[in-house]
Image (cartoon, coloured by chain):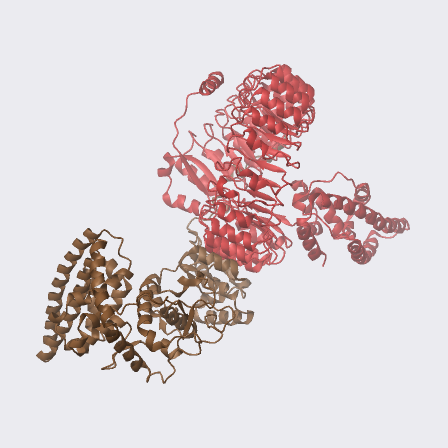
Amino acid sequence: MDLKDKVPRHASFTQHQQKWEDPSILDYSRRIESPFLAFNQTHTSQIKVPVQHGVVNELVQASKVQDWDPSAMLDNLSFLEQKIHQLQDLVHLIIGRKGQVLGRPDELVVQQQQLVTADLTSIIVQLISTAGSLLPSGKHTLSAATPSLEQSGQFGGVVFPSAQGLNDGFQPQNAGGCKVSGLPNSVDISRKNGNEQNHIIEEHELKDEEDVEEGESLIPGTYEILQLEKEEILAPHTHFCTICGKGFKRDANLRMHMRGHGDEYKTPGALAKPNKESGSEPTIIKRYSCPYTGCKRNKDHKKFQPLKTILCVKNHYKRTHCDKSYICSRCNTKKFSVIADLKTHEKHCGKDKWLCSCGTTFSRKDKLFGHIALFQGHTPAIPLEEAKAPAGPSDQGDSNHAANKVGSMNFNFSSNVSSESEVQSSMDIKGNVDDPAGYFSPLSFDTCNFGGFHEFPRPPFDDSESNLAFLLSGSCNYPHTSGED
Amino acid sequence: MSQESIGNTVGASNNVNRNATNINLQDVIREMDRLLQQRLRPMEERIEQLEEISLEGQLSQRRHNSECEEEYDGEIDDEQAYEQATRQGLRQQEPRHQRARPRYKLPVLSGFLNSTQTPMKKQKQDNPFNLVAEEIIFIILDLLNRNSLAIKSFSLVCKSFYAVESKHRCSLKPLRQERLPALLSRYPNITHLDLTLCSRVSDASLSLVSHSCASSLRSIDFSRTPLFSTYGLLRLALNCKNIVEIDLSNATELKDSALAAVAEAKNLEKLSLARCKSITDMGVGCVAVGCRKLRFICLKWCFGVGDLGIGLLAVKCKHLCFLDLSYLPITNKCLSSISKLQHLEELILEGCFGIEDDSLAVLKHGCNSLKSLDVSTCQNISHNGLPSLINGALGLRQLTLAHGSPVTSSLADCLRKHSMLQSVKLDGCFVTDDGLKTIGNWCASLRELSLSKCLGVTDEGLSSVVTKHRDLRKLDITCCRKITDASIASITNSCKSLTSLRVESCTLVTREAFVLIGQRCHLLEELDLTDNEVDDKGLKYISRCSELSSLKLGICLNITDEGLIHIGKGCSKLVELDLYRSEEITDSAILAIAQGCPGLEMINMAYCKYITDRSLLSLSKCPQLKTLESRGCSLITSLGLKAVAVGCKELTKLDIKKCHNIDDAGMLPLARFSQNLRQINLSHSSVTDIGLLSLSSISCLQNMTILHLKGLTPAGLAAVLLACGGLKKVKLQATFRWLLPLRLVQYLESRGCMFQWKDKVLQEKLDPKCWKLQLEDLMP
């Protein structure tokens, strides 16, 4: 577990954030947790750079880095390579120390070290190949062409086992309900699976959000509709190892895993990305349907709007039809069903300062005002600390009331939405909870409280004129008759 | 029952059109008169019976008893009469504080008063007014309403009068908040409470107000009154359910939370928040949501309020008809929602720099209901954007484009088809001749045109405007320095019905031209000739304007007593006269004015160095005099001031700066008689501690300027400041700042008094002629 946390953190030291923030790589590093066992038996030296080339190349293409300055990029990346080697040492050290401290057997420590080494090396391999792919296009196409040629020869050999394994992997688990069904135009999954997976990977890299494809308008019938079952959508993995049964989110990860099962999986052909069948048959556009009947994204809905990718299906299903189980630990109010949403929220949590009387907070003032304009009875809520209006210097008696008022005022805002009776009850509660000054509740204010009016503290000077009567004697003694002159 | 209904009806008629109520009032009075006659007959009969009884030799004691018995019947009669009156629709009454005194006379009432005088003197309890329905006395009081002294005397006649007056009064303007408890317990039917004179209003006072006038209060004015907070406002909003109008102007400390409190006043229709600099969109949003009936809102100088708040206001308050958004940082974004307001009649966008031509085009149809639009100082609105703002508003009557983009023919062309247009203000704009000619071709006939301080106004341009708009009532050509006699000639030739003409500082106009004004414009009520060449001959002709009520002759160095004597003879309705630095004026001119214009309320004789006590003595015969400025008249003494103090009981503003001969002896009569004095300037006079201290008996005194008083000591000053409890603003020399105890200053500030510390050295006296020359040198 510790390892999993550490890898991305070190990665951030590489000062090449944009690369690491690319979802594919992040995902990859996150997934490292699972292939631990598999990597146990591998030796780093055995990994061949060219073998990986094709796969990584695809990844890089997908992550839209081509338009950067290639030579500068390369320099940058070789620098990164050095960095990562340094990191590797560092991790070695840390792991070694940790093992000693915990008093684990030496063997385990060594194993772990090997693991880390394997991880890091694979990352470095990726980086190097990335740099290679950034070279001018002539070389790029050349290098890309080689594996694809090899691939075509070995296509049947490599792709089918994986596709087969996939089916084997989840068929028992899903009790036979996993097949794409009920569609006249649906294709045999076993034949097309490799192709499909490939497609998925590409799509995943490009976009995570289902709403991106909102505006798409495909003519019904021109595309193929696939519908995954609920269990399939919620399953954490879609790619399973045929040998040990371990599940993976990505086919690439599975292929990396497969290397550990024997040398036959280490051939460049086996590790290469199963490419699309060369343009012999036109690719049919695939769209997805939500299995939830009645949903707009369900194919039986009148105004059916298809989902573009499997990831879209997953996110849509979780967001719309599942419980929101992830709760923000900071505000304890916002709930999410997709963990990525929670993470996005956590970035902004606490910064929402625009508050409506209904309790909804907004990060932007215009959003709040749009909300208020839309709903009857909602009103902007004034933050508490501001509500404490400064009392005048001689109004100390009042300031107490004012402070008390602040509370009941906020309550008043909420009264807009709640019913009268609730108002009463909450007011009573307030009276009990607060200090004795609570009797100043807004509706039960009566005369007796006005005693305070005469009593409120005054500064030492009294402004009544009587005290200065002696000073005014001149004006008092003024002969009144003079006026009649 | 009767009180309650009066309170309600007064409030209800607040919204009624003034003209309509005036007509109603006439009907009411006529009806009352008829009723009174009906009621008077049995009373006269009763009196006759009583006289018969006394003739029969009955004792006066017995007569008293019988009267007491009769009194009861009288009460019942009153009730019946009242019911009858209500049935006939007599409930319509105008708010008393706004009412002008109707000229309709009640001969019966006066006769009635005469006939009942005798029994009144005999025995207090015989007061025959007990026989008269309260409503009738209320009507009488309404007629008295202009004259506060008369009302006061009325209430002091007897207990029942006192009680009736207490019930009758619905508008209150207290001087100090300390007196509020007593006042509110005396006057239970207050609907309008004006707290502007109070130096401070605490939350406790507001609680008291909200408690005692819970249901009756409809309007409250806090403008210029500091030191209340959210808590008090909340009390008010929650308790006074019927409150319709709140004025919170100048409450610069007020926060959004206070507006949240105001939003609890669900029936609010009128809210003024001018210069509430600390409020933001959030507060305005609260008001917008809370006060759905809002019709009038002023947000001038509320810098914290932007598009969002205004947009929400326009969305939520559909009934808005007056919107003042001057100097707000708003942009075109909120204009689209404003333009959707169906009832908006007056929109003020003065100094909204964020509003630009480019996106005004969105508002193709504008506000259809708009009658008055003010886009002055909006430099980003030109002839390109203006049409989109006003195209829909064919009912536009009033347009202010002051200090905006140049008035060219293309700008003026935008308004060609607005036939309802009555008033146009172009103050401070650059105006071209073509622009003015285009204005002349409008299909509207203007009533009011203001070209004050416009650059580029020539004889040609101005003539082309005035010859087309012959119905002009008001014309302002202040500081149009290029115009000559030709303009005056064409103005006087075509606009014979002018009531107001301002020609200040039109220096090229010669003295002969002013004769034309007097010869042709007889309906003038207001004439401003400040800083002009007008002479006695001109004044002689101007004195033919018998309706003249305001005449300004400041810095007219050519006029002498002779001209003013003509004015005094001809213009008997003069209310305001400005003779600032008209040096040749002497006592005989003032005597003529004081004798000829008994209604004089304001006179400025500043720096008329020949003025002596005799002038003040003659002015003391003007009982209405409210403002007297005799700054720099070094010949006047305490004796003259005493005469004014005794004669002019209404005096509220007095400026005797640099009157070196005025000393404590002048202050004592002032303190004794001028109980309405609010503002005084005593700088450079010979007044000392004692004189100042005596002024503390004037409870109205709020504003005091006491600079360069040689006889003033720190101790004396401290006593004065403490004794004058109602002071709101004091101008003092900066040296006193360190001589007064800090604690005292703090206390006074907490009482609502504001200090201004002046550190100015006395300036050399300037000869007015050379001063004027200097001014001219500055001009291009």
As rendered, which of A59 and A140 lies closer to the eye?
A140
Chain whose colour in the figure is red: B
Q: Is residue B707 left or right of residue B67?
A: left
> Visible in this render: residue B291?
yes
| Residue at x 26% of width, y 57% of height | A65
**Quarter that holds the N terminus of chain B:** bottom right
Height in image: A437 above or below B3? below
Occupied quadrant, residue B592 = top right
Colour in which chain A is drawn: brown
- Residue A330 seen in render: no
Quadrant in which residue A335 is drawn = bottom left
Q: Quadrant of residue A58?
A: bottom left
- For image coordinates 51% across by 51% down, the residue present is B311
From the viewer's side, name the closer residue of B371 and B775: B371
Indicate left or right for A372 with A45 as reference.
right
Q: Relative to residue B769, is residue A435 depicted above or below?
A: below
Percent position (x, y) of residue A179?
Answer: 38, 79
Q: Position of residue A295 (x, y in %)?
A: 47, 72
When the figure is inspected, residue B317 is found, relative to residue A407, above or below; the finding is: above
B259 or B297: nearer the eye?
A: B297
Q: Position of residue B244 (x, y in %)?
A: 60, 53
